[in-house]
Image (cartoon, rainbow, N blue to C red):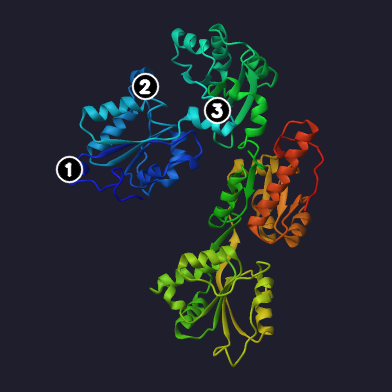
Amino acid sequence: MNPTSPTTSPLSPAFAAHGHVTFLGAGPGDPGLLTLRAVEALAGADVLIAEPEVLEVVRGHARAGVSTPELTVVDEASTTAGVPVLRDAANLVMEAARGGRRVVRAVTGDPGLDGNAGAEMLVCAAEGIPFEVVPGVATAVGVPAYAGVPLRDAQGTDVRFVDARTADERCWTEVGASDGTVVVSTSLDSVAAAAGELVAAGRKPDTPLTVTIGGTTTRQRTWNATLGTIAQVFKQGKVLPSPEGHRPVIAVVGERSAPAQRDQLSWFESKPLFGWRVLVPRTKEQAASLSDQLRSYGAVPHEVPTIAVEPPRTPQQMERAVKGLVTGRYEWIAFTSVNAVKAVREKFEEYGLDARAFAGIKVAAVGEQTAAALVDFGVKPDLVPSGEQSAAGLLEDWPPYDPVFDPIDRVFLPRADIATETLVAGLIELGWEVDDVTAYRTVRASPPPADTREAIKGGGFDAVLFTSSSTVRNLVGIAGKPHNVTVIACIGPATAKTAEEHGLRVDVLSPEPSVHKLAEALADFGLRRREAALEAGDPVTRPSERRPGARRRRTT
């Protein structure tokens, strides 16, 4: 952050006393398109006002406890009904700002190009309420970019923006007489009418056209046609009539939107798992980085906790071990999970300790995620497996006890109540004494909501990632067996065997016991599936869209 930037300088007392409003562009829908300044403004907001779909995009960057009053526009019907609590956006903004609060008014796209934020700014100006504007990626610019439709070429094509809802006859005549690119903001069921207006104004019926709905999100879909054929394309594809006919779309008219060009430039919709609903049956903390990786492949991760972590029934053993760390009882402490790190960290905080208590103790982590949790705690592990990230991999690199170099022969091993004995037995074989301590208990989580259970059993998910045998058993136990059209991906042979024992056919097996390698393997499977469909001249569909009884290939 630039400390001299006028948008980030501290508020004067007088400025703060009158409140402040930030009109913020949230972009077309992809949360990744928020600007750094937008994220900063959201973090400092006392009140966040936005339509529900915009709130979904920005809420994650707001501080805990931020007020999000419901935004409802007063209309004649509500006034007649005498409902006193309905208030429009301008009233909500002004009420909060008059109270000296920092208000963020978030809108779709860009405040200056999308919607009617200008009218709300005028209200602020009239009442002397200071405000600022944080520009966002305009919908009419961001959506074509995600659809693979450049708006200009090397010759500097003229670009016109038209809102079909407010365009008059003069507007259509002007853009119809132009040979440049026209970007039309309209709704799905009004696209054909807008195309007709352009043809009537002079555009040729064979002018290429692309129509994109759900732009910049994993719900994005784009149709290629011409001004003269778009109505027929929608009819043949059974796109319309539809309950979603009111949804906004961006239509790009001109040679820049030619289908031949989109085949090469459609980078977003051609991601290997684009639009796939992927079930991630892990705890929410463990699922975060995996879900981010899946999103990078175009997937829509759905996190379903299958286990809950609880303290041990008898905490005395854990308490003695933590005190032993401080008094020098141990040479090593070995962490076999993120949850083990969390359990020890919570016990440290309970005693007023911090990472300095690990001074003089060697620290081992079973894998990268566990090591990252330790680093977050302020501890850099001395040992992380160079090969397989498992107890066996840790033992491969663990040094044998040497009385000459090791003044203490004892290892503290905080772990789950259901952990295997592999590591304990291996350490004893290497000459170490092991304090095997139950740091936490794992219990089966509560069943997910009914609609999630129905989606699991009814084929609503395209894939499910199993990261351990327990996730297989627990998911089937709390939600039922995934449908046979769902792609089953397993982290290793033991997990795959458990899945098969539960009647599941394993489609993807990770080449290494790593959640990130598992996600990569699923992406490779999706890419090969997509390429096979294109090579055969078939439409690219998701597994959940496949016909019942269709054969599936097994891959490793």
Residue 549 falls in image quadrant: top right
Q: Look at the numbered disc 2 and give the secondary structure of its residue.
A: helix
Q: Position of residue 387 (x, y in %)?
A: 68, 68
For image coordinates 57% across by 14% down, the residue present is 195
- Image label count: 3
For marks 3 and 2, the one nearer the N-term is 2
Query: In the rendering, which numbered label is found on residue 69?
Result: none
Observer-nearest residue: 256 or 31? 256
Residue 547 visible in rendering? no
For the residue marked with disc 3, what is the amino acid? Ala
What label sits on residue 154 in the rendered view? 3
Kindly indicate the quadrant of the structure image that contains residue 262.
Answer: top right
Judge depth for marks 2 and 1 and give the one in front: 1
Please say if the residues under marks 3 and 1 sit with CB atoms less than 8 Å apart.
Answer: no
Give the residue at mark 2: 78
Asked if labels 1 and 2 touch by Cβ distance under 8 angstroms, the answer is no
